[in-house]
Structure formats: C-alpha cells, structure tokens
Image: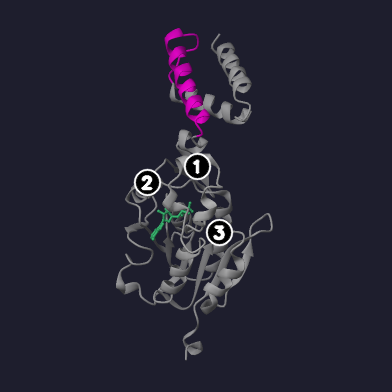
Amino acid sequence: MFRHYMEKKVSELMAQVPDVADHEALRLLLLAVDEGASWPVGDPDVTAEVAGRFEGYVERRRGGEPLQYIEETVQFGPLELHIDSRALIPRPETERLWELAVDLVKGLDEPTIIDVGTGSGNLALAMKWIRPDSIVIGCDLSCDALDLARENAARLGLAVDFLIGDLLDPLPTSLRGEVDLIVSNPPYVARSEYEGLAAEVREHEPMEALVADTDGLGILNRIAVGAADWLRPGAAIICEIGETQGLACLDLFSGYSPRIEEDLTGRDRFVVGSAPMASDVH
Ligand SMILES: C[S@@+](CC[C@H](N)C(=O)[O-])C[C@H]1O[C@@H](n2cnc3c(N)ncnc32)[C@H](O)[C@@H]1O
C-alpha cells in the first residue's frame, strides 16, 4: 500500500514538475524513507509521516533549493560532507583542483597546505584525508562556513585548523616563507555575470562565495600578491578560475611561472604556478 502510494506520489510529481528529474524525486523519496528507519510496513500513521516528509522535500525542491541542501550531504572526492546553506556546494570540477593539488605536494614530507576560502572545508579535508602527514589550514571570511567546516572535520576525524579572516591574513606569522602549497577555489564570478547564473544558485547559495570585483579577478589578484609572503621558494600555488580568465590569470600570476590547466571538458579552469627559487630573486 505504501509503495503504491509513493509510486503515485512520484508520478504526480513528474507530471506537475517536468523540470524535476526523476532521479531527484527518487532521491527525495529515499531520504524521506531513510529518516523513518523504524517504520513498520503498513502502519498508516508512520506512512503518513514519511509521505509528509517527502512532500516537504518536494516542495523545497520545487522552490528551487539545491538537492544537496535538502539532502544535507555532498560527495567530494573520497569524502561525504555535510552541507547546508552556510557554504557553497562543492562542485565536481573542484575535485579536479584537488587532484592537481595532491600532485603538487607529491614527494614532500609533512607539507604545509593552506586552503584559502575553504567554505565547507571540502578541499582542506580532502587534502588531509589523502595526506595524513600534512599540516592543513583552511581560511575563510565567513563564520558560518567555518562552523560547517569544523563540523565536517569533527565528523570525519580529520585534524585541520580553520581560521577566520581575509584571505591569508589569519595565518600565524611563523608560517611566513614556510608554506608548501596554497590551494584556493576563490570567488571569481564578475558582478555583471552574477545575474546570468541559475536562479537556484543566486537564490540559495551565498553570493559572497561566488562574486569578486574587477571582472571576477579581484580576489585572484589579491591571492597572487599575498601568497608571495607565505610560500617557501619553489612552493606551489593553484587556484580555480573562470573559463574565460586563463589569459588574465597568466598575467596576474606572472611571478609564479604560471600555466593553465583544463577541466575534464577541455576548458581553462585552473592556474598553477610556483614561487621563485631564492636564486631567481634579484
Ligand atoms: C567559491 S567558494 C569555495 C568554497 C569551497 N572551497 C569549495 O571549493 O567549494 C569561495 C569561498 O571563499 C570565501 N571568501 C570570499 N571572500 C573571502 C575573503 N576575502 N577571504 C577569505 N575567504 C573569502 C567565501 O566565504 C567562500 O566560502
């Protein structure tokens, strides 16, 4: 009876909201059922409870809320993270940033890694997970995002420090010239482009996680300038960028012998460089 009711509900949903994908409706259904784990088959009260939850989730999805915020979960590389509207939802292309960043510290013992604009802590935590010997610090301007990042660290049992402040400012001065890798997925959307983003993104995800001034390049520029004080000679820097920002970023990061890396669809999405060796500095 319950199954029949739910199948009918899912069919109704499909008919009313053709833009909600079948797999999403099914995930919401599974979410509603999971939360009622003790539900005995056929109990009409509990059935109503599960159905009520399902309808609530469907309403939220119809209102444009991202699926991940409703499920409160997102997969990032090897990690299942808690996610909610306190931070940007980690995107699949950022998993490529993580892979490239992992390569940049290969062969280094106990590397010191800084994640600038850590959000939910996805990059910082995935770095610590794959390199348990590393010292990882995540920085962010958002108190809410850092609360979420700390919750994720505690849940996953990963020892990462999260510090509040503007870009690299919160780092202890003892790290000046000692950092092995700066990794960042900073805000890089131009204000003029923001209105063109999907309503789902604009209405539910934090704007300050996405938008930067100077055509989206303002924060990338400040990271490039600021990183020089923290990286040891020869240390690496990698940032995610917008697909049209490759040339501009080669210029911004010109002090780091930069190159551009593509994402899996062949678009320019990452700027990678290294700090000059002491012998290169005149
Ligand atoms: C694009 S989100 C990236 C979040 C996460 N690292 C990820 O990959 O999904 C950018 C993050 O930078 C943070 N941020 C924006 N301006 C900042 C600043 N001036 N200093 C530090 N963090 C900043 C935002 O709060 C947001 O969490």
Q: Badge 2 is on which residue? A: 148
Q: Of helix, strand and loop, which one carries label 2?
A: helix
Residue that appears at 39% across and 46% down:
152
Q: Mark 3 and ligand 1: say if the CB distance to the nearest ligand atom is below 8 Å.
A: yes
- Residue 29, disc: none
Counting from the top left corner in percent of width and height, residue 266 is at 69, 58
In the image, residue 223 sits, relative to residue 20, either above or below, namely: below
Residue found at the very far front of the displayed protein: 192
Q: Which mark is residue 97?
A: 3
Q: Quadrant of residue 24?
A: top right
Contact check, label 3 and label 2, Cβ < 8 Å: no
The foreground one among 73 and 108 is 73
Depth check: 234 or 260 in front? 260
Q: Does mark 2 have its CB less than 8 Å from ligand 1? A: no
Q: Residue at x 53, y 58 (%)?
A: 98
According to the picture, the residue beneath numbered tag 1 turns out to be 74
The answer to which quarter of the image holds residue 8 is top right
Q: Earlier in the sequence, mark 1 or mark 3?
A: 1
Q: Main secondary structure of the magenta part?
A: helix
State yes or no: discs 1 and 3 in contact (Cβ < 8 Å). no
Q: Is residue 134 above or below residue 52?
A: below
Packing grade of label 3 (10 A; few <14, some 14-19, many >=20) is many
Identify which amino acid the numbered label 3 is placed on. Answer: Leu
Is residue 10 in view?
A: yes
Q: What SS does tag 3 mark?
A: helix
Q: Is residue 184 left or right of residue 162?
A: right
In magenta stretch: residue 57: yes
Could you give the CA–CA distance between mark 1 and mark 3, rounded to whole angstroms?
17 Å
Q: Which residues, given as a range, are shown in magenta?
A: 38-64
- Residue under the point 47% across and 39% down: 73
Question: Under tag 1, what secondary structure?
Answer: strand
